Image (spheres, helix red, strand yellow):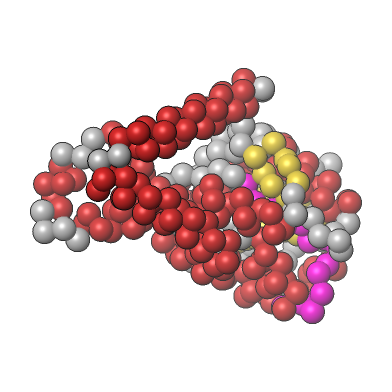
Amino acid sequence: MNDQPKVLVIGLGLIGASFAKALKTRGEAYVYGYNRREGVAAQAKELGVIDEVVDNLSELPDVDCIVIGVPVLAIAAVIEAIKPALDKVKAITDVGSVKGEVVNIVRQQLGYVPASFVPGHPIAGAEKSGLMAANDQLFENHMLIVTPLEETSAEATTLVSRLWSACGAEVVSMPVARHDEVLAATSHLPHLLAFSLVDTLSRESENREIFKYAAGGFRDFSRIAASDPTMWHDIFLTNQDALLAVLRRFQADLSQLEGAIERGDGDYLKVVFERAKASRDHFSDILEARKNKK
């Protein structure tokens, strides 16, 4: 323990618990854990996800890094609770999917952005949530995006990057605003569409028959609709501008497809489908190359 960094993970849901477990099982850090719901942190220790339980955020142990793994709209309360300890830590980071809102929350709660603060977001997840879904391989061959600010120290960025790299993640850096635009298109919009489609079909009078005969395409597309509703509620409300921009572009394209089907314009449909297939094949190649990199 003496030569290991000491890390506190606040919020032992899928991402927080998987991060903690990855560090602990690899021997990369001594891991403390806190969860607001009583009994979760104790269970995490029993399962070998963390080394030690923290019961109260107002009485924190001396740690090198604090990782906030709670939904975006719950971050303000965490920042308020740990405020007295922030001067002692080398780095503080989060795992939120919307970086602009997280930065705003930190500024509002503290009145400034500490040099130790490194906004972060792992591009990994699963439709399952909670402690029992913890997976120490979750971040292997996945990206971790850091969005350092002007105030962020190089030391803090290096420590956060090293911890995520130790979990198998590829660390990349980009500006806050660009992160939120990219994620609105590649993650937030697909989740919104999946939630909407499943909700629409579930309200059909014959929904049981519809789901009974649904095949692989529906299963693959709808999988992400099983994700944590609270987390996604927060994401959609806190990345409004970027999400609405890409949603409106999609709605315009969808209207074009609707018109082509009405007109029987097979040529237009074929052009769209072939272009989409080429893009998806390219994406598959990128994923395969990333997988073979390690």
> Could one spot residue 268 in this view of the protein?
yes
Q: Residue at x 55, y 38 (%)?
A: 138
Classify residue 262 as left or right of residue 224.
Answer: left
Q: Would residue 116 be counted in the magenta stretch?
A: yes
Using the image as rendered, state which of residue 42 and residue 137 is in the foreground.
Answer: 137
Q: Would residue 118 be counted in the magenta stretch?
A: yes
- The relative height of residue 18 versus residue 270 in the rendered view (above or below) is below
- Give the image location of residue 158, x and y in percent: 83, 46
Image quadrant where residue 240 sits:
bottom right
- The relative height of residue 98 versus residue 146 in the rendered view (above or below) is below
> Could one spot residue 8 in this view of the protein?
no
- Give the image location of residue 29, x and y in percent: 73, 43
Work out which quarter of the rendered image holds the C terminus and state it: top right
Work out which quarter of the rendered image holds the N terminus and state it: top right
- The relative height of residue 175 versus residue 24 in the rendered view (above or below) is below
Image quadrant where residue 169 sits:
top right
Q: Residue at x 34, y 58 (%)?
A: 196
Q: Residue at x 31, y 50 (%)?
A: 259
- Give the image location of residue 254, x and y in percent: 38, 51
- Give the image location of residue 87, x and y in percent: 85, 68
In this view, the residue farthest toward the top is 292
Classify residue 132 as left or right of residue 145.
Answer: left
Using the image as rendered, state which of residue 15 and residue 229 is in the foreground.
Answer: 229
Please provide the residue range marked out in magenta.
Answer: 109-122
Q: Residue at x 41, y 61 (%)?
A: 229
Classify residue 253 as left or right of residue 123.
Answer: left
Q: How many badges with numbers are in the image? A: 0
